[in-house]
Image (cartoon, rainbow, N blue to C red):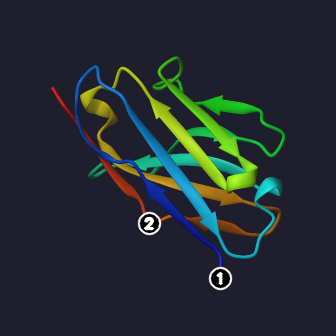
Amino acid sequence: QVQLAEFGGGLVQAGGSLRLSCVGSGSFFFNLYALAWYRQAPGKRRELVAGISSGGTTDYSDSVKGRFTISRDNAKKMVALQMNNLKPEDTAVYYCNAKGSSTSYWGQGTQVTVSS
């Protein structure tokens, strides 16, 4: 059974940094999956924050470009999100996603709260 587990959420002051990690387990070819981080704030829809393709191409939402960096380590089945210069509007539950040609897996989410 494939599972994704996120780590690293917490409470931080505006301007601070956090690093989220997501580790995959189970039988799947992690290196073939596109990976992404999404977030969902209370009362809002889940939105894409950053993505990285199987080949390492990255993409970011305009709201986090220049502040967040996504990376992957296929040997460790891990995708990370380095978040710098955090703002109160970054407060949300963050989810990692692994998307293959016909399957998609989600983690359980980790809370990030940025105080002003």
Q: Going by the picture, which residue comes out furthest to the bottom?
A: 1
Residue 66: image x %, image y %? 52, 17
Q: Is residue 37 above or below residue 101?
A: above
Residue at image coords 46%, 25%: 63
Q: Are marks 1 and 2 in contact (CB under 8 Å)?
A: no
Decide: is 40 above or below 3. above
The kind of residue tagged 1 is Gln
Q: What amino acid type is highlighted by mark number 2?
A: Gln
Residue displayed at 33% across by 26% down: 86
**In this rendering, position of residue 75 left or right of residue 4:** right
Which numbered disc covers residue 1?
1
Q: Point out the image quarter for the N terminus.
A: bottom right
Callout 2 secondary element: loop
Q: Quadrant of residue 97?
A: bottom right
Q: Residue furthest left?
A: 116
| Residue 68 percent location from the top left of the image | 50, 27
Mark 1, secondary structure of its residue: loop
Q: Nearer the viewer, mark 1 or mark 2?
A: 1
Report crowding for label 1: few under 14, some 14 to 19, many 20 or more residues within 10 A (C-alpha): few
Nearest the viewer among 28 and 44 is 28
Is residue 114 visible to the viewer in this orientation of the structure?
yes
User: Farthest residue in the front direction?
Assistant: 75
Asked if residue 12 lies left or right of residue 90, the reply is left
Residue at the (75%, 76%) spot, across then down: 27
Mark nearer the N terminus (1 vs 2): 1
Q: Which residue is mark 2?
A: 108
CA gap between label 1 and label 2 equals 15 Å
